[in-house]
Amino acid sequence: MRPLIQKIDSATQRQINLNSTVQKSAEYSIGKKDGSLALIPVYQAKKVRSLEVVLLIEEWASMVFWKEMAGEIRDWLEQIGAFRDVKLYRIGWDEDRQNLAIRTYSNDTCSIHPKDLIHPRGERLILFYSDCTSPDWYQGRYNQALQDWGKHQIVTLLSPFPEAMWERTALSRGWFVSLVNQTPRKPSQNWRFTSIPLLLQIEKEEENQHILRETIQKTYFPLPTISLTPSSLKAWALVVSGDSNATCAGVLLEKSPQNREIPATISPEMSGKQALELFASTASPLAWELLKKLAAAPVNLPIIRLIQSKLLSASNPLNIAEVILSGFLKVYLGGEPVKWDKGGKFNFHTPPNSLDFELDDEDRELLLTELGNSRALEVIFVLSEYIAQKLNLSTTTFFGLILTNPQVLLGKEAANLVRAFAKVSAKVFQKLGEAKYQEISQKLQSMVDSPPPPPVEEKWLRKYKTVTIAKVKELTRGEEILFQLLKDRLKDFSVEDGELYQRLRLTPEQLKILASEEITAETIPVQFREVLDNTEEEIITEKFNLTLFKSETVFVDETGQITAKEPVRAFYFEENPPSLKMLYIPSGEFWMGTEAEEIARLVEKYGGDWFQRESPRHLVKIAPFYLSQTPITQAQWLYIAQREDLKVERDLNPEPSHFKGSTNPVENVSWLDAVEFCQRLSKMTKKQYRLPSEAEWEYACRAGTTTPFHFGATLTSNLANYNTTQRFAKEPAGEYREETTPVGQFPPNGFGLYDMHGNVWEWCQDDFWENYQGAPNDGSAWQEKSKKQQNQANKALRGGSWCSYPDVCRSAFRRYFNRRVYDIDFGFRVVCGAGRTL
């Protein structure tokens, strides 16, 4: 991309020309009788990068497979330094599918008109990122906009597929050509094609090349087309820069296209064997190898990537594209075949990891034969490791359970994956022939055929989910007991510490029950309840010298009606500034994020790509910590902000808030302001204060719940301060207050925390990441490795605010802003480590 790093004179920005200014000032000053010097500034146009970039990603269902790369492409374009600005938009159609709709990538409410993409001086490069498989491409509905833009500036199609695969997309409706250009930044509509395709010459029945070229130019327009391979990008960059010796790929598209039918991926006259032979001969060797290995696995995108990384490290995303576009994999969402239409459940906003793929039985048999027994077993071993790790089991234990006690696995979080793994593995072992493999195959098949276990009734555990469980952990001097409630099993480990026996006065039989790894759904309700009923509230107070906080939390159904009330008992120490109560949050584990099915439901209901930031859902372990019971109030902020003697890095405005009130949350503060507050508080108290990590924040907000809100199925204006003009479920509209409210006036959650939903957004310590791929699982903040990258990063916000709709006030919702930005709904709360003393 180096040829694109060029500078031109800015039409709007000026700078002083130092040499000319010195010379002009000297000339003017010479001969002045008073001997004074005059400053005569001489300005010149500022040099700027020659192009800015607009990256358009097509808002079509099949692009769910490739859209994650859009953010990477944008970041790459910004990092190479060739462009003065890079913007990312979605392009699709309005609700009536009549007019083009171009929206900012992460915000449906901000849209632009197609003509606004035309730069008055042609200094804009439009990259249209699409796989060209939508009906709109086959019907030529984008052609007019592409022509309009291409008359004024460079427009280029960026395909996720290698050039060899373009023939299988709507680009086959045009004519593939090589393009040349001799003028830097010349509009792509004026680029020339080097030679006329032979079939096009035959179709036009014109021997005179000059007349034929004029005829083609009246009928077709050129669209430069590139893939993400280095050779394709390099050739295109040279042509953009005006290198007359360079050529790049392109396609001639009809100016007035004819509406045509979309072809089937595989000819219906072709048998499965013939289709596979055709794919094997035309696809890349790595794509063919990948397809064969997928025959031995239940298929989704995480598993495809797993097989790539473990067994085909030389492969790349283009090989995945070949396999998905082959037509052998049928796409399913929630167990149902997907429909490739905008109104269906499967659309551009569907989280790609929520999709499953299926091979026809005949194709699977043929592919397994091609793969061979040893390589099929290799795939099964890799998958066993992967699933066992998700279940926190060793590979040996996992495979032992799946053959001897599969019901234990079918109640766990990854039950659907376990069942799918058993179904495919049964077919693999059946093909191996030997008696021992046939026996394994039968056991696996019986697991697939068995009904899932009944759900466990968990309501009786609600009153134990906060203080009591925290006591059980803390009384073993740390984290020797791990409390984990799964769908079918409650598991606790290691109670060797005699302090548990001395303090709780449990009988040996009760200790045995508490420590057992074999507590099942049938034994939980009676036996474990007896153990918990023997605990005493005062123990933590004695041990940590904390104050006991008592209150009550509520749970509501989807209509907003209160269905249960539960006592809250939490422990805290009080800190200066005034009324800063630091609540003890016990250690534990929780599932962070949102399940794929729920994300798909939210996307379908509200639209918007941002819900995918909550995936993939993953298990996180949290160490104990202290968290301020409320967002920092204006009185607490003033107490610290006016202490200039505590300043660490920056000044603080003592009264930044738009809405005034000493007990209202402080707002209008940036992430940098919040960090400065924590640093000053640490300096004053000699304790370590900081912002919470995203994991700590969500764990504290949920307080043991798995519902959208810690109150249950929805919010009401009696439970939180938020924008009630939109409803989340079937709750009444309620009161929209349109400003912040004093903290602590609504019910707390199960940990005793107030205002976790609404009132103000709360800054977190983490840099912002588009999803949880690669996120830490220990509760720590997820930050860039280098300090420089951290200083450039956006920062995470949680909880929603007084002006937020309820769907973004959920426990799992994630938002981000630049760390320097402040707004009238940005606040924060603080964390102190469980050790507390610096």
Image (cartoon, rainbow, N blue to C red):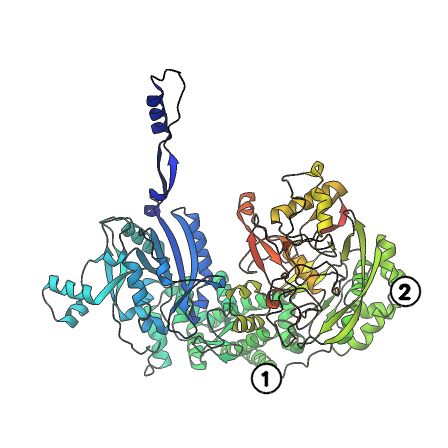
Viewport quadrant of the C terminus: top right
Residue 653 placement, left or right of 296 = right
Q: Residue 794: image x %, image y %?
A: 55, 52
Q: Is residue 371 visible?
A: yes
Q: Residues within 10 Å of mark 1 (few under 14, many from 20)?
A: few
Q: Is residue 645 above or below residue 380?
A: above
Between 258 and 474, which is closer to the camera in this rendering?
Answer: 258
Q: Is residue 297 visible?
A: no
Q: Which residue corresponds to mark 2?
A: 505
Instruction: Find residue 321 and report its image quarter.
Output: bottom left
Looking at the rendered structure, the kind of residue marked 1 is Asp
The mark nearer the N terminus, 1 or 2, is 1
Q: Which mark is residue 380?
A: none
SS for dot 2: loop
Q: Residue 43: image x %, image y %?
A: 36, 34
Between 769 and 164, which is closer to the camera in this rendering?
Answer: 769
Between 417 and 675, which is closer to the camera in this rendering?
Answer: 675
Q: Is residue 426 above or below residue 48?
A: below
For the point 62% across and 56% down, the residue is 825
Residue 409 placement, left or right of 164 = right
Q: Which residue corresponds to mark 1?
A: 449
